[in-house]
Image (cartoon, rainbow, N blue to C red):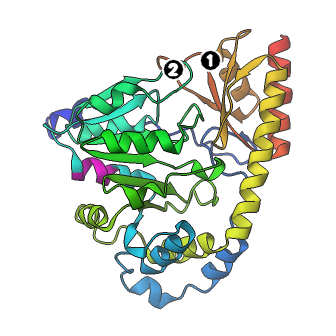
Amino acid sequence: MGYFRENVERAKGYEPGFQPGQMDVVKLNTNENPYPPSPAIMKVLAQIDAEQLRRYPDPVGSAFRQAAAEVNNVEPGDIMCCNGGDELLTMALRAFCDENRPVAYPVPTYSLYPVLANLQACKAIEIPFDNEFNLPAKLASTNAALTIVCNPNAPSGTFINTSELASLADELEGVLLIDEAYVDFAEENCAGLVKDFDNVVILRSMSKGYSLAGLRFGYAIAQPDLVAGLMKVKDSYNVNAVAIAVATAAIKDQQYFKENVEKVKADREKLTEKLRALKFEVSKSYANFVLAESKNCKASEIYDKLVQCNIYIRYFDVAGLSDKLRITVGTREQNDKLLSALEQILSE
């Protein structure tokens, strides 16, 4: 047709995990938290009134900024609300990158990064991880305007120590965005780096640890000058009034959040142990999923056979991942159904 920009015309676009229409399935393919969100948010939803919906929302989400600042031991001015973590990635590419200002990141990683780079018409410099997903030394010398490190990394679940990322931030001339969408399931995080580095942006998501994937709410942590610059490229009212109220209630209920996360972490360790008993190779994960490889059956075949059992996990037909399967940690009942099906498949 010729209506679209050339880079949009040739773009494949991001492919989200399959969303089955039926409810009676074991859905372990999109890294949702298997447990419900805090009961506190249901009370907030019940109190939403027509006036809140009639009026535009607070354009910066002040109530959430205050609550998130307290949880992360920073100032409210260091917080920016986003319509999911993906919106922050879009804003960062829009703010920092163009035809002459590239983005860099290690691979394999979150597959949205190259899609956004293409839409922004900026060069994407992809630096391969080694087999153990260590931080590539070459990442510090790309001269990119924006460097993104997903930590814990998706889809490997591996974790890079905070001290290594601090050294990277110190070496870079551009901005370092640390994508901590899955950090709730790790043992440490990089929020403290914001106090020491004016070039660090932390991405956080309410989708994983807080069980709010359907809400689409995330936030950034950065020094006020970076937040102010990112504010220039956000939509005028990028988070709605209901989302602000719900996300604020969720992040305030830290006791429920921590208990929920600990359940997922315990289930993750049990799932890892049982997958290894089935002869899968599973590296230690710091996220709410594991990456598993079978030497006895092709990953694509396992995926297809699980679909026939109404069990959905994630298969990536791309270099470096085509022999592996990413499995979200589900409830114990869901994990047991998966393991039973895998045992049957591998015995055929």
Position above or below: 120 against 219:
above
Residue pushed farthest bottom? 51
- Disc 1 residue type (three-letter): Ser
Characterize the magenta stretch by its predominant secondary structure. Answer: helix
Q: Position of residue 211 (x, y in %)?
A: 64, 58
Q: Earlier in the sequence, mark 2 or mark 1?
A: 1
Q: How far is the residue under mark 2 from the one under mark 1?
A: 8 Å
Residue 60: name its quadrant: bottom left
Residue name at image x 42 percent, y 79 percent? 62
Q: Is the residue under label 1 in contact with that under label 2 (CB below 8 Å)?
A: yes
Residue 68 in sight in this render: yes
Residue at horizontal 65 percent and vertical 48 percent from the top: 187
Read off the residue under disc 2. Answer: 317
Q: Residue at x 34, y 64 (%)?
A: 223
**Secondary element at tag 1:** helix
Q: Can you give x and y, in whole percent of width and height, for residue 240 in the image? A: 43, 73
Q: Which residue is mark 1?
A: 300
Disc 2 crowd, CA 10 A, few/some/many (<14, 14-19, 20+): few
Could one spot residue 150 in this view of the protein? no
Quadrant showing the C terminus: top right
In the image, the segment drawn in magenta is: 90-95
Q: Left or right: where does residue 271 sit relative to residue 170?
A: right
Q: Quadrant of residue 335?
A: top right
Is residue 23 or residue 119 the one in the foreground?
119
Magenta highlight on residue 33: no
**Relative to 348, does residue 70 appear above or below in the rendering?**
below
Q: Residues within 10 Å of mark 1 (few under 14, many from 20)?
A: some
The disc labelled 2 sits on which kind of residue?
A: Asp
